[in-house]
Image (cartoon, coloured by chain):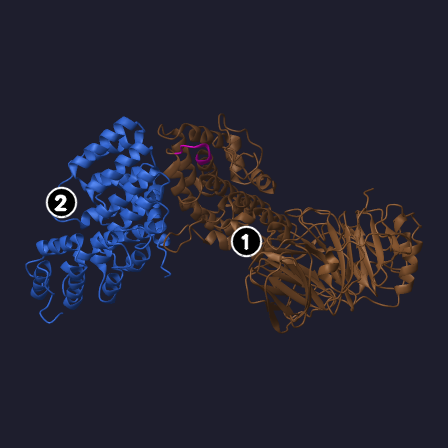
Chain colours: A brown, B blue
Amino acid sequence: MRSFKNFTILTAPLATALATTACSGDIVHGAGGPFSETWQADQGKSIAALEARLRSSKAPPAAPVAVGVDANALYGITLPSGQRWTHQGGADTVPVVAGELVVASDAGTLFALDAKTGTQLWSVPIDNRKLRGAADDGDVTVAVVVGEALGKSRFVAVARSGQVIRSIDSAVALGFPAAKSGIGFIPWNNQYVSAVDLKTGDEVARLLLREIVSQARNFDGDLWFGEQGLVRFDDKIRLATTNQATRVGLPKRQLPGKPVWLGSGNQLWPVNSSARLKIRLSATPTATGAASADAHFTNHAYLASYFRVVLGLSDQDGAVRFVKSLGGDALAMSSGQRGFAICDASGKVSLVSEKGGDAGSADLGARLTACAVDVSAVSLDETTPAVSLAEQIGQALGDLTPDMAVAQKLLVDELTQLDSPLVTKILIDLTSSSKIPPDLRAAARKLIATRRSGKEYMLAALERHYDYVSDVLLPPPLGPLADALAAMNEVSATPLLARHLNDPANEMADVERAAIALGKLATPAEYEELRTFFALYRATADEPSLVNAVVAVGGALLRVGGPQGKTVVVRAAQDPLTQVDVKRGLSALLTPESTAASGSEPSERPRPPGSEPSVASERPRQSAPAAPKSPNVAQNSERP
Amino acid sequence: MPVRNPRTLIIGAALLLPSLAGLAGFARTAVAAPPKAAKAAPAAAPKPKLDLTSLKKTLEAGDEAETLKALDIIAKSGDPAGATLVELLLSRGASVTVLSRAIDTLGIMAQPSSGAALAPYAQHRTPELRRAALRALIATKSPLAGDVLRHALHGSDPSQRAIAARGLGELGVRAAVPELFSVLPKDVAEAAQSLGQLCVGDECEKFLNLLGRLRFEVMESGLVPILLRPQADVPDELKLKLIERLRRMATKPANELLQAALAKFPADGSAAVKKGLERAIKGFAVTEEAP
């Protein structure tokens, strides 16, 4: 356990003098000196007694407000829609919404603004320290400020008049504080929360937690302590040492960038801390009922940000409930009693209903480097219902830039868990988007092959061809579509697939898969397209996939072409100009058992000698056999 | 601008031959009969002088060297009946070497009836074959060529687009004007020459409005043709406007272009335009009224 050698209790009104005057000596009374190592565990008695004493009162909830920061000013707006205000001068760390105030530090000064108007209420010097955390009990604001040297923490309590009524310097790091009814709650040493009477300076109680505690937070008037999980300051608090207090925690799940919820209360949040601000979790704990047994999170959900994407996740299992894409990187989020608020770098505050629909928006009027937003005490009404989750994911994927590959992958993974035909459309759109990185496009293609719904989107995609004039510069994902449609026995796709056979803009591997699908699905109506392809490539096939495609089409000609088709294949099999592997494949097709098989009922056939199947880039190592047959088509497309 | 995709027509054309071939497999018996296009050829068409039966047998035998020799014989003969044999060869398919020679042969024979046999090869995956097929199609002046070339303009091969753009002008395919406008700013400079040959009225004005917005090198191949077009297609007023614009550019390429137009100017061309060219080359405004 670390020692606390220096602490100073200051009661003089002149903060400048006070901040530098060390009045050493043990003037703290009660359960023991604050941050004292000699404190004896009291089995939660002191903290339980304090809780009982304060139970009837409530800490003031945070004003619903968003506060943005740029290099020149703070920009505020009350939510859901209110007057905008501007406070000239910046902030060096992310401001904190503390009750009805906004507390911030800048250039060695701690100051408080009225959250509704932006009017400055007070300002006190803090000796080049910066704000780490703040809270307000309605009369007194408490804050922890720190210098560049970590561990040099100072706890200050400032009255509305600007009078510093308490200042405690500590050699060890103090966490994010809370306040209620004249008591300051200060986490320290990742283990304790000292409750200090702001008037007397006495440590009136101490909470010992068996998990990391660096945060003391006020959510809608209730205090919670912890870091990764939070313990509620209620009638169970005395059981905290035995892990039986009222506790909430977020479900564990993999998320891009490994975001944290509150993070360590011992760290600073500089306004330019880039990615750290943009990859976060946000949740507001709540507990209803006297027993407090049903602690959970408001909306039964929490938010996860990754730059321009915000996910709404179930607080039970982490399942994705909604997805929002933003016009700028997410800088701050807050979960309300109902609904959510997200402040992004463009200066927009998006209000989201509990179901992920729109609940309005506000504009801070400037591009931001940091933001603080708090709607933990309010409910936001939905103005526009959310579209389906599949559509939300599709929109987000479309909005993402190529450098957001991690988020894109997560969204695609989520997408494929949904049972909606729209998923097929979204995956097809992904393969046609130039914004999608190659890896993700490959993943989307692979997934399309596994789809068994959304036929209408598949057919619509096949209608499309590469078209330089119309700027359609990516052909549709022919191979995966062919696999899927073949597995679905979708005969209506055959004219479209046949047309793609003879389009040189398609990748050869895709053409091979289309040929194999046609081997299964083709009807006499496609005879001429098949025959043209066969004629063009039977003697010019110069790669395995093209060889396989020609042989597959040869099989289709035998199946649907009648005597005419058979003549074409037989003559090709005899022609010395026919490519040697093609000839071998055709000969195999023309063996008696193969001919029987190509007629109607598919059956197992021997593979023609030397016809190693080609491997399509995103397809599993599954062959398009030189003598393709229906069952293999289905097997191919069912593979992931 | 949405344009009609001529794919359907091309595929239809491609299917003509197979259906013929299908009647008798590879051994088409009607080879001896002159093809329809041959009938339409001028009365002075050379008398058949090829041993068609022997050539047919050679072309079907699958011996690459012999096939190439047979193709040379047909190309040299200029006999339209030989073209039919080559068309059948294409409809059956062959090695790249043979196909390449066969396509060139049809280009040399320049029979409009060969369009249907050549059309599918404009979509072949081997770039050399499809480019050769487009060139041959242009040479045949087949009725199918316009649609095939238009389709090629939509394709992914830049060389193919360039050949197609040029060919559309050569063949006078007016229907392709919107597509040519679409590809002109997209690195298909050959579209400029064709637009210069094909545009009428507002289209020419639209084309000239691109002067200054697109690089001069892209536009210049279309400017001389416009100046040489008859008054019925391109009014003199527009030509004079163009000449004046080129004069004011006062660059060497613009001046050379004016000189080239004057050198090629038809004897029966507009006197006003000719005078305008002469004045502009000397540095004067195209008309005396002009500032």
Residue at 94% x, 54% y is A45
Residue at 8% x, 62% y is B279
Q: Position of residue B132 (x, y in %)?
A: 28, 41
Q: Decide if residue B25 is on the left or right side of residue A422.
A: left
Q: Can residue B143 be seen?
A: no
Q: Can residue A31 be seen?
A: yes
Mark 1–mark 2 CB contact (< 8 Å):
no
Q: Decide if residue A559 is on the left or right side of residue B192.
A: right
Q: Nearer the viewer, residue A575 or A153?
A: A153
- Any mark on residue B45, and which? 2
Q: In this rendering, is residue A567 above or below A82? A: above
Q: Give the range drawn in magenta.
A: A541-546
Pointer 1 chain? A
- Any mark on residue A400, and which? 1
Q: Residues within 10 Å of mark 2 (few under 14, many from 20)?
A: few
Q: In this rendering, is residue B222 above or below A486? A: below
Q: Residues within 10 Å of mark 1 (few under 14, many from 20)?
A: many
Q: Decide if residue B23 is on the left or right side of residue B264.
A: right
